[in-house]
Amino acid sequence: MHELSIAMSIVEIVQEEAERHGSVQVQAVHLRLGQLSGVVKEALLASYEMASEETLLAGSKLLIEEIPVEVMCPQCKAPRVVRSIQWFCCPECGAPTPTVLHGKELEVVALELCE
Amino acid sequence: MSNEPRLAEVRKNVLKQNDVVARSLRERFRAAGVLAISLVSSPGSGKTAFLEKTLTLLHARYRVAALVGDLATENDAERLARSQAPVKQILTGTMCHLEAAMVQNALEGWDLNSLDLLFIENVGNLVCPASYDLGEDLRFVLISVTEGEDKPLKYPTIFNSADVAIITKSDLAAAVEFDEALARRNIQAVRPGMEILKLSAKTGEGMSGFLQFLESRISRPPLPPRNKVTEIKPVARLH
């Protein structure tokens, strides 16, 4: 389980940002989490609570937007979202799809700050 | 408390620190002409036996070295040292994966220019290592015939992150009624086009094919057969 160390990195990044905004309290953190990031949402949420204690993020919410796996279909020549990460193929034509365009994201995209 | 919160855009990759170190490692490997290969698998899939065999076979013709990650004990490094290749253990303590900075620290004092090939054996774990780039050129995922053909479907993320799949312990395939075609299908389902090699470190089956694959990726030609100095060594020990 590496979600705790991921949560600690999130806290570190957000703490720095909050300090740049004058050490304001953070109400919520918006995170984009790809289905192929290797991070489990539930474990991350639990770890976040622990990691944010006694920081500017204490009591804040971690709002996770899950990003599905988008691949490039070599047959249709178009981006497609796979139906399952156990089957990397085009949902339209069934062609195997080795090229992953999205789904590995693990990024903080926005903060809600208290003035 | 009644104040409306203000939304501040950030856009920061959470693993940026790791990615920055990984990128610099990759550049160092490229500049020194070192092919860096990481190994991931579940515990007990035969990573160390496979690596020991590989190091032993390659040691005569290429300058190879290995880093091995484990939570505790230096047993693996001791085992691998029998191959005579330089080996360093990375003890991760409670960490379930290697990070780029650990690799960077472990390489301190090593001259990469004196290497052709570096193996980085990750901690036995098919979950966490998927998220961390170690700066490697290729990631090998190992699956032993005793694990079941559906491993790729259970851990699609790490299989998708790897470049080559190695089916190990092929000598036991018949005994455990391993369905190779099914395993191959499952690997291709989670990573279409992935190269698959099957071998046994114990009997040597498939090792020559594997070595050929490796040699096609190594940038330098093999060294001439070992010189006399190395051959004299065991004799010198007798005195």
Image: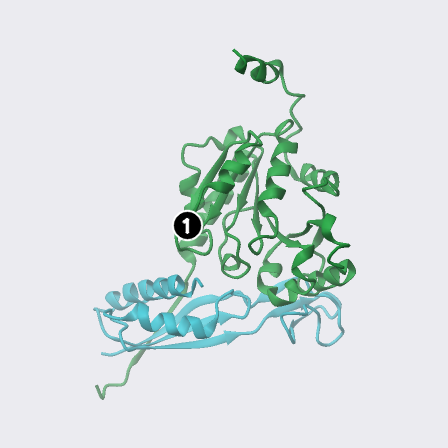
Chain colours: A cyan, B green
The image quarter in which residue B159 lies: bottom right
Amino acid under disc 1: Thr
**Looking at the rendering, which quadrant does residue A91 occupy?**
bottom right
Q: Chain of mark 1?
A: B
Q: From the viewer's perspective, is residue B173 above or below residue B212?
A: below
Residue found at x 73% / y 48%: B171
Q: Residue B151, percent across and down?
A: 64, 63
Residue occupying image coordinates x 52% and y 49%: B122
Left or right: A33 as drawn, with respect to A99: left
Helix, strand or loop status at disc 1: loop
When the figure is inspected, residue B215 is found, relative to residue B190, above or below; the finding is above
Which quarter of the picture shows residue B218?
Answer: top right
How crowded pointer 1 is (Cα within 10 Å; few <14, some 14-19, many 20+) is rated as: some
**Pick the front one: B186 or B75:** B75
Q: Is residue B149 visible?
A: yes
For the N terminus of chain B, the quadrant is bottom left
Q: Which residue is mark 1?
A: B92
- Which x, y percent locates residue B135? 51, 47
Q: Residue furthest top?
A: B239
- Number of on-image labels: 1
Image side of residue B139 versus residue A33, left or right: right
Q: Looking at the picture, does residue B214 appear above or below residue B129?
A: above
- Estimate the x, y position of residue A38 in percent, counting from the top left: 51, 64
Tell me which residue sits at (39%, 51%) in the image.
B93
Toward the viewer: A6 or B19?
A6
Q: Position of residue A86 (x, y in %)?
A: 65, 69
Q: Is residue B9 visible?
A: no
In this view, which residue lies farthest toward the bottom?
B2
